[in-house]
Image (tube, helix red, strand yellow):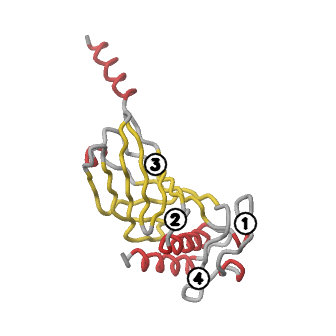
Amino acid sequence: MLFTKEVQKKGARRQAIRLHSVAALLKERRFEGSFELNGLRHRLVYAPARAEAQGGKLRLQGRLSITDSRGRERSRDGVGAIMASSQGGIGGAPPRRQVEGFNMPGEFAQTTSGVLPVTDSTGPFSFCGVIYFHFEPLDGRAFGVGADLSRVQLNARLAPTDDVARDLQGLYSSAIDALYGEKVNERAAAAFIGEINRVLGAA
């Protein structure tokens, strides 16, 4: 009997669903995406309220909302997400403006050029096309999700179609360059993160 119960417990653990990642798109100030569990689609919206540099890494904090297939929304404020990595974008670079005396090389500070590379943009024309964030451990039950949300990665694609998102793409790219580039520049990172917070707070 004890052996049978132990096998059942192990079987239950093996059957536990774990949500590994969610793809999302930057729209204005929010990251919007969706995922499926047991054939049911859930909508996810992450709306950062502030950004900061924590231990040399970009960290966002904001409101996470998950809407189930029946339209019931559950939200939580103050959810943290730390950048794990980024991927360069393809195409014309977004405009990067000078912030408190800091800017990227002259060519990059200009608006998008008409020349579109067929591979990831590099050098002074590089920019972020995708940012990968790790959410802090989440309680699936609090969001009405029957899955393990302890290690969810947000695959945030930056392909802006509005001015706010386009501005944030440039600012996120500049902050990431300052924090993760070959030459770390904490003062520049602080300046760009401050500007990110100004944009996020303008909602």
The residue singled out by tag 4 in the image is: 97
Sequence-wise, which precedes: disc 4 or disc 1?
Answer: 4
Q: Residues within 10 Å of mark 3 (few under 14, many from 20)?
A: some
State the residue at coordinates (31%, 19%): 8
Sequence-wise, which precedes: disc 2 or disc 3?
Answer: 3
Which residue occupies the foreground of this view, 105 or 114?
Answer: 114
Give how far across and how far down residue 161 sits, in percent.
52, 67
Q: Secondary structure at mark 3?
A: strand
Q: Secondary structure at mark 1?
A: loop
Tell me how far mark 4 sits from mark 3, CA to CA: 30 Å
In the displayed structure image, the side of residue 15 where residue 53 appears, left or right? right
Tell me how far mark 2 sits from mark 3, CA to CA: 21 Å
Tell me how far mark 3 sits from mark 1, CA to CA: 28 Å
The disc placed on residue 116 is: 1
Quarter of the rendering occupied by the C terminus: bottom left
State the residue at coordinates (42%, 44%): 35
Tell me how far mark 2 sits from mark 4, CA to CA: 22 Å
Sequence-wise, which precedes: disc 4 or disc 3?
Answer: 3
Give how far across and how far down residue 16 sits, in percent.
36, 31
- Which mark is in front, 2 or 3? 3
Sequence-wise, which precedes: disc 2 or disc 4?
Answer: 2
Q: Secondary structure at mark 2?
A: strand
Give how far across and how far down residue 86 sits, in percent.
59, 59
Quarter of the rendering occupied by the N terminus: top left
Q: Residues within 10 Å of mark 1 (few under 14, many from 20)?
A: few
Q: Residues within 10 Å of mark 4 (few under 14, many from 20)?
A: some
Figure quadrant of residue 179: bottom right
The residue singled out by tag 2 in the image is: 57
